Amino acid sequence: MRENNHGLTMSTLVKLRDDATPLPAAGVPISPWVDLEGTGESMQSKAETDVLVGLDGLKQMADMFLSGQDARDPLAAPLYADLSGLPPIYVVVGGDETLLDDSTRLVTNAAHAGVAVRLDSYPEMQHVFPMAAGNMPEADDAVQRMTAFVRDAMGLD
């Protein structure tokens, strides 16, 4: 099964661990899409506020990506992966995203698997908002926090 590009950070960490390949010091998924079935409550509750990502579009992408394969394959949908043994993970997500519950459920699963994990949900922010760094204070703050997280995980602070 190919990895889901929107969950690529998590899929890559799981695959590296499974292949006994050295893991990076940390993972920083931004607005991850880790549930290809779209079962999170935020798919409905944030549908009016998310101007970028909707359930219908996600289902179409999932169907094309999966090509009839299992929507719960852990490499395609890391929400269903065993996350034990992964490095620290810092998830950044917009509070107005339909994918918000993907992030919160991923963080819960990681914590239950013993992974050091942190979640920052930015109110009123959209999908992958940190890409607006240099133009939006929330994006600048998120990038600074991601940088600090990785530096700490690498022992650089």
Image: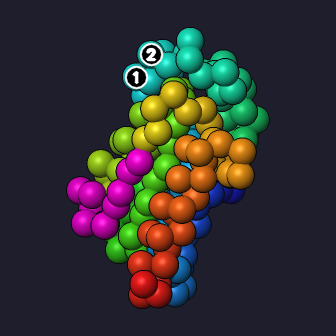
Q: Looking at the image, is mark 1 or mark 2 nearer the viewer?
A: 2
Q: Nearer the viewer, residue 72 or 111?
A: 111
Disc 2 crowd rating (10 Å Cα; few below 14, some 14-19, many 20+) is some
Q: Is residue 85 above or below residue 123?
A: below
Disc 1 crowd rating (10 Å Cα; few below 14, some 14-19, many 20+) is few
Q: Which residue is mark 1?
A: 41
Q: Which residue is mark 2?
A: 45
Queried whether the magenta region covers residue 116, the answer comes back as: yes
**Image quadrant for the N terminus?**
bottom right
Query: What secondary structure is marked by label 1?
Result: loop
Q: Percent position (x, y) of residue 62?
A: 67, 35
Q: Nearer the viewer, residue 36 or 131?
A: 131
Residue 122 visible from this viewpoint: yes
Q: Residue at x 45, y 32 (%)?
A: 123
Task: Magenta stretch: give its range.
Answer: 111-120
Q: Amino acid at mark 1?
A: Glu
Q: Residue at x 71, y 52 (%)?
A: 134
Q: Is residue 43 left or right of residue 137?
A: left
